[in-house]
Image (tube, rainbow, N blue to C red):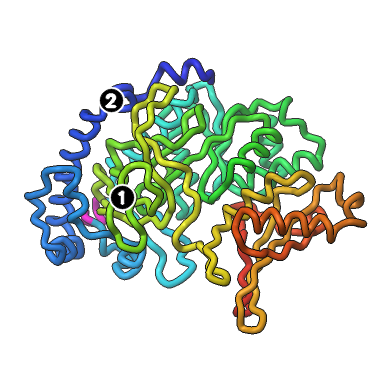
Amino acid sequence: MSSQTAKKDFWDPEISTASRDRIISIQIKNLKDTVKYCYNNNAIYRKKIDDAGVNPDKIDDIADIGKLPFTTKDDLRDSYPFGLFCTPLSQVVRVHASSGTTGNPTVVGYTKEDIDIWANCIARVMYDVGVRKDDIVQISHTFGLFTGGWGFQIGTEKLGALVIPISGGNTERQLKIMADFKSTVLVNTPSYTLYIAEVAEKFGIDFSKLHLKLGFLGAEPWTEPMRVEIEKRLHMKALNSYGLSEIIGPGVSCECLEQDGLHINEDHFLAEIIDPDTGKSLPYGSKGELVFTTLTKRAFPAIRYRTKDISYIYTDKCPCGKTLIKMAKPMGRTDDMLIIKGVNVFPSQIEEVLLKIKDLEPHYLIVLTKENYMDQIGVWVEVSEDNFHEKLMDLEFFEKSIEDKLFSAIGLHIKVSLKEPKTIARSEGKAKRVWDRRQGGN
């Protein structure tokens, strides 16, 4: 799994190193086909397109994407469970769904051909960073209706490598399997990866003596300092993997070994950036909401799906040799943004500050409360084991210094409460970073 190999050898070189003109020509053809297909095979899409005053036969250019209506998570919930499918269920071989934390879950489907496209997308991003048939891939995502684990399983199988679908949880077993089976690749959430590292340290396991070389981490926001911490503790290169079930699952985009932006599989997914308030398209390099249109899916195609992820896209030449457009690692979401005393705050901004401070552990909880009818924000963060007792006599000063750093970065006073090591609950899946106690939440 060498960097040199990955830079010169690609899963699909005709796509991964294609010219911009070639990519655009593929996207135009597939966009035209997708719009007509949705219009002819789904009454909801037909009405949305008609209401927008768009003639599917008049989609002739990439810029025409701006004429089409958006699709949102509410559309999926309102059409629950199969209202946005474009094939009969007799042609659907698998469904996945969101957790459905509010209202109906969002349900997506796949034909046999869709599954093959998904597997190829994953195989491409894995192969292009050097994963080969002799690698052993440990998937620690939870399996079930969540797409993360399944996508990497079928992609690994397509690649021909050995896959260990261990799923999430049972961390001691994770470590035993990792050591005994000599896993070389880890697929996981970044927060659970850090927890695995913490448990390993408790049992005296030295990752430098294991075989891990590469991690595909995603399904939750994480920052550059968190990547540094993961790479230092697990002795592996950590890559940001991006996807969402409404588009296909993981495999939409992934970092190369340069770790400077995520290459999008553009022959299958057309990316846009829009102003989240006005819906207007923004040029390359502008920060805004990420929107995707699927170009090849059949059971559940998506036209201009609003992801609510904040990012930007760019075409800078990448030293890895791939010419596929890149998106910046999402830096927040329009729906997890906190507005406290008129200030917009993303949890990832707080994490960015905390993980740069020596003597803090990468375990924190943002706590929202209400005082005198005003929203208040605080953060609980653990002090490292080695320094807790040393800092005990000076916690107030240390807390104040952290509060000053947060204020400098965010422009808002955030009350800091330092906690003893291992007192903040750990996650074996997506980390819970915000505790909203304003309405008695727990």
Query: Is 306 on the left or on the right of 414, as rendered?
Result: left
Q: Residues within 10 Å of mark 1 (few under 14, many from 20)?
A: some
Task: Provide residue 53's location: percent of width, then percent of height.
Answer: 11, 62
Quarter of the figure with residue 229:
top right
Image x and y of residue 22, in percent: 21, 28
Q: Which residue is mark 1?
A: 282
Tell me the number on the disc at residue 18: 2
Q: Is residue 126 left or right of residue 135?
A: left
In this view, 182 is above or below 233:
above
**212 within the magenta span:** no
Q: Quadrant of the C terminus?
A: bottom right
Q: Quick check: can you spot residue 253?
A: yes
Question: The residue tagged with tag 2: helix, strand or loop?
Answer: loop
Percent of width and height locating residue 273: 34, 49
Query: In front here: 220 or 276?
Result: 276
Q: Which numbered disc, 1 or 2, marks the residue closer to the eye?
A: 1
Type of the residue with mark 1: Leu
* Snapshot quadrant of residue 232: top right
Q: CA distance from mark 1 to mark 2?
A: 24 Å
Residue closest to the far bottom:
372
Amino acid marked by disc 2: Ala
| Disc 2: CA contacts within 10 A as few (<14), some (14-19) or many (>=20) | some
Residue at (41, 16) in percent of width and height: 8
- Write the start and end of the magenta stretch as one range: 86-91
N-term mark: 1 or 2: 2
Q: Residue at x 81, y 53 (%)?
A: 421
* Residue 112, visible in the rendered structure: no
Q: Secondary structure at mark 1?
A: loop
